[in-house]
Image (cartoon, grey):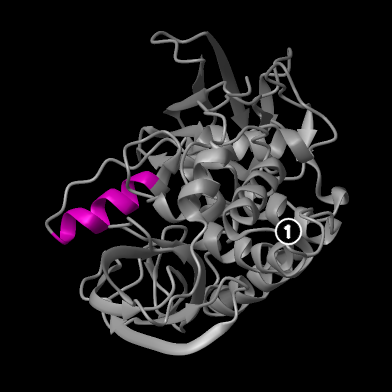
Amino acid sequence: MKYKILVLAALITATVLSGCKKDNPDNPQNYSFSGKVQKGPFITGTSINLHELNENLGQTGNSFTTNITSNDGYFSLDNIELNSNLALLTASGYCYSEVFGETTNSPINLQAIVDLENQETVNINVLTHIAKARIEELVSEGTSFESARTQAQNELLAFLGTNETVNVNFEDMDITGSEEYNGILLAFSVMLQRHSQQYQAINDMPAELTQLLSNLSEDFALDGLINNQEIVDTLMYNISKLKINEIKADLENYYSDMGTSVSVPDFEPYIWDFQEAHSDTVYTEIIFPDSANPCIPMPNDNMRLNILAVDDNTHFDGFNQFTLAAIVPFGSSLTIKFVKLSGDISYDEACNSGWDYINQYPDGFTIHAQNFNQLISTLFYLNNYTDALGSARIEFYINGDVSPTYIKNITWDL
C-alpha cells in the first residue's frame, strides 16, 4: 500500500507579500536563530558559516561563523547584523551515520539557502542541500526567492514519489521531529547510503556520499528533474542493502546516550513511495520463489533451493547450500521463526540481503522482512553433526498475525 502524507496548498500569495524584502544597508537588522545540522546528526566541533546574500543570491561579503556545540547537531547565531534577510549556511564536519550506527571517518559538507525573517529555527540537511542549486538556477532566471524555494521543494518531493506540497520548508524538518513530514527527511537521508559490513566499504562511505550529493544536485539544478538512471539505480540499490529495522533503534539509542529521549518518525512509507515511483514492477502478494540467489547481487548461476518455498518439498540433502528468500509487497509484513527440533543449522549473516536476523541459538532464529518489493535472500545451511536426521519447524507470520499463518515442517540428512 502506498501511503500519502497530509499536505496543504502553498500559500504563495502570502509568502510573496511577506517575503519581498530588499537589501537595506541604511537599516540593518539583528537576527538570532538556532538550528540543527543533520544527515544523521553532525557532532560537536562542526563549523557553521553564514554568508549574507542579496536578492539575486549573490554574496555581499558579510559573513559570520559558529560551531556545533553538542552531538545532536545543535548550533546558534545570536544578534548578528545583516542588511538582507537571505543567507547561505554551510556546515562542514563529521556526522553520526544513521545507516551504520557510527560516526563518519571524514568530514561532510551540507548547505542551505534560507530566509531568516521571523525565523527562530533554521536547520541544514540533505534536502536543503539538494534544493540549493535549483533555487539558485530559478532565481537567476528571474524567479523570486520565495517562489523558487517553493518550486524546488515541490520538484524534489515529486522525485521522491510525493507529488503533493508539504506545509513546511525543508529547513524546518528534523529527523527526530514527531511530525509526520519529518519522515520524508529521514527516508531521503538513509537512502543516500547503503549498509555494508566490509571495513573498506565503510571507510569509503563519506566520499561516496559526497559524490552522490553532488550528482543529485547537479542533475536537479537545471530542470527540476533527477532523471539520470545511474543515480536512481544507486538509490534503489542503497535501499536494498539497508537494515531498516535497526535504524530507528540505533538513532534513538544514540540520543538516549546523550540523555535525550526522541521518537524517530516513521520513514518507511516514504522509502516505499520512492521505490514505487521508480520500480518497473509493484508486487501485491508475498512470493516465495522455488530458488533464488542467496548472495544478492552475485550472478544468477549461484541459485539455490529456497527452504521457504510453499511446496511439497520438505526433505533436503544436508550436503547442499540453501537460501531463505521472499518478495514482500509494500505495506506488508513477514516474520519467519525457524525452530530447530534436531540436528544443526547455520545462517550466514554476511550473505544476507533484506532480513533482520535475531539469533536464538541453539533453538533456532527469527527473521523479519525489512526490505520490500524486491527479492530478499540469505545463505543457509542444514547441518547434521549429532543425529542421523535433522528436523525443524518453520512458522510463517504474515501481516502481523499473532499465531502462525501457516507452518512448514522439514527434515534433512547427510
Seen at 72% across and 17% down, the residue is 284
Question: Is residue 255 rendered magenta in the image?
Answer: yes
Number of numbered labels in the structure image: 1
What range of the chain is rendered magenta?
248-258
Residue 233, percent from left and from top: 78, 54
Seen at 65% across and 56% down, the residue is 148
Query: Around disc 1, counting alpha carbons within 10 Å, would you say few (fewer than 14), some (14 to 19), or many (20 or more)?
Result: some
Residue 282, percent from left and from top: 77, 26
In the figure, is residue 184 to the left or right of 305? left
In the figure, is residue 88 to the left or right of 103? right
Q: Disc 1 marks which amino acid?
A: Thr
Residue 176, percent from left and from top: 32, 48
Q: Nearer the viewer, residue 379 or 137?
A: 137
Q: Which residue is mark 1?
A: 234
Q: Quadrant of residue 137?
A: bottom right
Residue 85, percent from left and from top: 42, 68
Farthest-out residue, bottom: 61
Q: Nearer the viewer, residue 209 or 359?
A: 209
Q: Nearer the viewer, residue 79 or 186?
A: 79
- Describe the element under mark 1 as helix, strand or loop: helix
In the figure, is residue 284 to the left or right of 346? right
Q: Is residue 384 visible?
A: no
Q: Split into 4 quadrants, where in the image is the C terminus?
A: top right
